[in-house]
Amino acid sequence: MTDGQKKKSGVDKFLSVVERIGNALPHPATLFAGFALLVVILSWVASLFDLAVVHPGTGETITPFNLLSTEGLHMILTRMVTNFTGFAPLGTVLVSLLGIGIAEGTGLIGAVLRLVVLSSPKRLLTFVLVFSGVLSNTASEVGYVLLVPLAAVIFLAAGRHPLAGLAAAFAGVSGGYSANLLLGTVDPLLAGLSTEAARIIDPNYAVNPAANYYFMFVSTFIIAALGTWVTEKVVIPRLGEYEGDEKPQSIDMLNAQEKRGLLYATIAILLMTAFILGGLIPENGYLRDPDTNEILHSPFMSGIVAFIFLLAGIAGIAYGVGAKTIKNDSDVMRGMAKSMETLGSYIVLVFFAAQFVAYFNWTNLGLILAINGADVLKTLGLSDIPLMITFIIVAALINLVMGSASAKWAIMAPVFIPMFMLLGYTPEFTQVAYRIGDSVTNIISPMMSYFALIVAFIQRYDKNAGIGTVISTMLPYSVVFFIGWVILLIFWILLGLPVGPGAEMYMP
């Protein structure tokens, strides 16, 4: 029996069915347009029934908003442009890729990739990509914009299927969203919401941003290991050999000019790093928040995309000067323009995806679904480990219809934190369980802000790929991450370990 005639496993057959069903759907842009139209119709239907719910945090009555009303029609017409231009990932992607385009056009990225490929064993390369994806969450969008497409190029250069590298990085960036060795922007955001919810029971309770650090620190290595296993044992065998049109970059040893270019780029990066550290390390540094001197809410963190642009652009120019790949300013501009040429399909996807997300938010259908789902869990009467596992599942399912972690937690925290406090669980522990559920389905949720970008990245290597390709490729990661994280949580409960500094699992 030849390799091509090998019998498929049950898992592979199931994923193939998922892929065929998903790819049988219309073009992703058409699909988002259809979703937007469906939301308009559903908003009218929902407005005919008594579907009002009470927001658990504000006490406000939430009712469906009919987009087929005169006011709704006006909103659709007058906000179409701002829905598109205000779509969060769009500006991030465009600005970041302008800088990355310089680095790619001058040859810096290609030279670095060759070093990585030549110096990293294949097995270690997969782990490094997943691990790097998890760590990239400290700077929010960096992983989606830079690491995910870079991982595909690295795998292709190493003679492996590029989509396997892309999947590994995406799994770390998005599936491992809540794990990290460092605190990120999401930590203080969730902690603030948890504090407000906890004060419904205890007016003096405060949840600090590092409240989940111990659990998330350990989770980083668990997710990196599980992501590596899924990539090597499930994704790579299923994808087989790459037969697409994209050609791997040369992995010849670096010549003298390229080495000089890397030296110049390294010096430029060190100077930029010194500038950044000079603004962050002093207590009143120029890159800290001018009012509170914090780093997490500082201009540095909110301007991280600008730093990506500057770092990539300056390093790329420095490399081009050293390697003599830049002759004049026109060469720099050509690199930036070329990076924009690859985004045509993504921009089309974003236009329709932005309308769909806006309509869904306007109608309040997401809020109504989330609050009703939370109420169902509250009435089940479960306790201990089954309660937390059920809560994780609900958070994971809600994540499929609401992409924002903070928006979901703003709705769920006022319900579940007081309830779990009365059952003896701390707000910090409840927040850990929520973050698990919020992370594991990110990679298969079309509502995730960067989902359209991932589809565009995949289509570079597989012109026939669609939403089904993304979901079928990433579903094994979701399942394995869920199982692994739940097992870790069960051990944490059985051992009675604190989830963070001063954050026990049980109320005193």
Image (cartoon, rainbow, N blue to C red):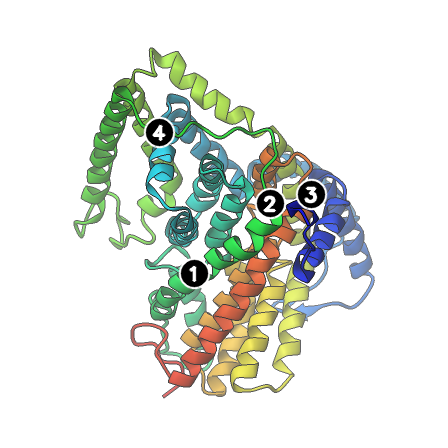
Q: Is there a contact, CB below 8 Å, between mark 3 and mark 1? A: no
Say few, some or many: other residues with alpha carbon within 10 Å of mark 2 (under 14 / 14 to 19 / 20 or more): few
Is residue 461 visible in the rendered image? The answer is: yes
Q: Is there a contact, CB below 8 Å, between mark 1 and mark 2? A: no
User: Which of the two residues, 102 or 87, is positioned nearer the viewer here?
Assistant: 102
The residue that appears at 82% across and 58% down in the rendered structure is 45
The residue that appears at 55% across and 76% down in the rendered structure is 389
Earlier-in-chain disc, 4 versus 2: 4
SS type, badge 1: helix
Q: Check disc 2 and report the residue beneath it.
A: 240
Q: Nearer the viewer, mark 1 or mark 2?
A: 2
Question: Label 1 to label 2, Cα distance in Å?
Answer: 22 Å
Question: Label 2 to label 3, Cα distance in Å?
Answer: 48 Å
Q: Amino acid at mark 1?
A: Ala
The residue that appears at 48% across and 21% down in the rendered structure is 337
SS type, badge 2: loop
Earlier-in-chain disc, 3 versus 1: 3
Percent across and percent down for residue 242 are 58, 38
Percent across and percent down for residue 56 are 58, 72
Q: Check disc 4 and report the residue beneath it.
A: 111
Q: Check disc 3 and report the residue beneath it.
A: 75
